[in-house]
Amino acid sequence: MTDNETRRGIYERMYRILTVDSTMRGLMMKGAISIIYYSPRGQEAIPAAVSAALTPADYITTTYRGLHDTLAKGAPVREVIAEIIGRSGGTCKGKGGIMHLSDPRRGVMATSGIVGGAIPIANGLALRCQMTGNDSVTVAYFGDGATNIGAFHESLNMAALWRLPVVFVCQNNEYGEFTPRMESMTVQRIATRAAGYAIPGVTVDGNDPDETYAAAHTAVARARAGEGPTLIEANTYRFMGHIFGVDQMEYMPKQEREAALANDPVPAYRRRLLERGVATEDELAELEAEVNSEVEAAVEFAMQSPPPDPEETFTDVYAEAVPA
Ligand SMILES: Cc1ncc(C[n+]2csc(CCOP(=O)(O)OP(=O)(O)O)c2C)c(N)n1
Ligand SMILES: [Mg+2]
């Protein structure tokens, strides 16, 4: 059972993600910024719930569509927005952008634009923790399409064999770019792929934060106890097309998309919190007002932050040479 404080924390993360996402799209639409942007709209519940099962010392790796994962892990909104628009105040001084966003101080260790590319990196982080007796757990977030990639299968095999403290979280949004999922795989349930590696595979409604939290909590506890990895398939839907504004979503059946939009996880969870007496209308309105101000101030900070100095081109790129 998810306790009430955890639930309010999950809703706050969901609302923050929603607000940052709609703000970014708004800035693009009015021409204030010009960026490549992969909207996580519709997928808010997954990292909001998974993060509730993590500590600040735990790690994540993610993908280009990882704004929600990054914010949910606790990266500050102002530094994240500055990073996405390429400003020096960003988490990577504006040199990473959305495709390579990281914030190691908050456990956001790597973002990859290579589909499946950050999954083995999660194994590496977990291996280091295992070898040094550090009890941090690493969550690897990736999409449904990534589960067709060799790196996914190799990573599950290795993590299973070495009982690495990893939780593999597949955000199954039913599309890989413009291709419906079932045109690229034969398995109905991605979680069944775990059986090939003799690890637990769990399918959850990724739009239901309580169900997702329960599965994440079990998987994180298992990883932390040295019992090895879990594959969680969190079913959801991508509301906005692959790259925001670039594709018009003609390949997504209208009815399918409308049904998904009607099942928007953010207002649905808000209703649940009110219905179950987890929070009052006033409390939620206050929380939302605070997040709105936070995001407004973050945009101001980011827009005023200068672009990176050309001098920065060669900093943070290569590791310092280790003396022979
Ligand atoms: C190895 C590799 N192959 C192809 C691409 C091109 N590509 C970028 S995103 C994407 C779709 C991935 O779909 P999925 O894993 O479901 O993630 P989603 O975008 O739905 O979050 C593809 C094929 C890539 N970036 N890397
Ligand atoms: Mg997908």
Image: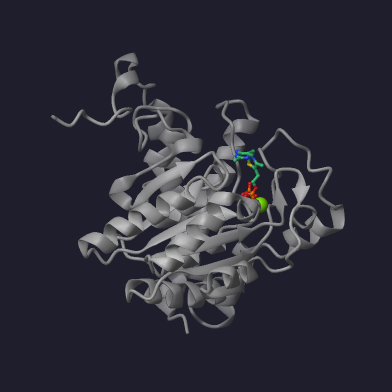
Q: Position of residue 275 (x, y in %)?
A: 59, 80
Q: Tell how many labels.
A: 0
Determine whether 73 is above or below 296 in the image.
below
293 lies left or right of 241: left
213 lies left or right of 128: right
- Residue drawn at 77 percent across, 47 percent down: 179
Displayed quadrant of residue 197: bottom right
Judged from the image, the quadrant occupied by ligand 1 is top right
Residue 279 visible in the shown view: no
Q: How is the image coloured?
A: one colour
- Of the 4 image quadrants, the one containing the C terminus is top left
112 lies left or right of 194: left
Q: Position of residue 153 (x, y in %)?
A: 56, 57
The front one of 16 and 118 is 118
The front one of 83 and 231 is 231
Q: Position of residue 178 (x, y in %)?
A: 76, 43
Farthest residue, direction left? 323
297 lies left or right of 105: right
Residue 92 visible in the shown view: yes
- Residue drawn at 59 percent across, 76 percent down: 272
- Residue drawn at 56 percent across, 46 percent down: 65
Q: Position of residue 208 (x, y in %)?
A: 60, 71
Determine whether 74 is above or below 272 in the image.
above
- Residue drawn at 33 percent across, 74 percent down: 226
